[in-house]
Image: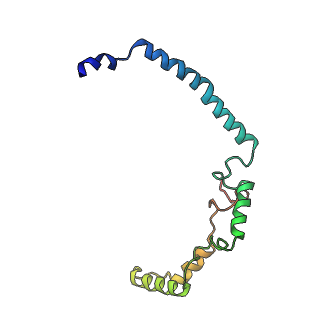
Amino acid sequence: ALTLMAGDANAAYGDARAWHSTLLPLTTLVVPGVGFGLFVLYIFDENAWWRSIPGTPKGMAKAAAWQEHPLYANSKDPMNGLLNKDDFEKGLEAAWEKAKPAGSTITVKDKLKELSTQDTPHSMCIPYEQRKLSA
């Protein structure tokens, strides 16, 4: 039974022409048309793809709206959600005292204070206009 289907396995000249008549218009008309259309949207609309481009006006407005909601008001705070912040800091300090290298003068309180005022100019959370980018 398999020998009867062997002739169908070979591609014939007519099959290739059928694919050519489909792929030629697709690759020369449809795909470039969609690509150029998306490019025009990107150039002329500042809110195009606002979810993937940080700092767009619509994206900033949506982020501000989420920050006004009571459940998400503190979502940018890394300590948000801790039930007992003091207990966390005591545990962190005890773990650091146990694991720190000999002769180290770094303390947990100093490091937490340093990290709370950390300057992150390349952060995606900062609007593009406010970033301090080095040349």
Position in image of residue 90 (x %, y %)? 49, 87
Residue at point 47% right, 85% down?
93
Q: Give the residue at the far top of this rendering.
A: 13
Say whether residue 122 is left or right of residue 9. right
Quarter of the figure with residue 40? top right
Give the camera-side residue of 55 and 14.
Answer: 14
Which residue appears at 60% of the width and 30% of the height? 31
Q: Residue at x 51, y 87 (%)?
A: 87
In the figure, is residue 19 to the left or right of 76?
Answer: left
Pinpoint residue 17: horizontal percent, then vertical percent. 48, 15
Residue furthest front as drawn: 1
Front-most of residues 108 and 61? 61
Pinpoint residue 18: horizontal percent, then vertical percent: 49, 17
On screen, residue 24 above or below 120: above
Does residue 130 appear anywhere in the picture? no
* 117 or 31: nearer the viewer: 31
| Quarter of the view holding residue 129 | bottom right
Q: Residue 25's spot in the image, x, y percent?
A: 59, 22
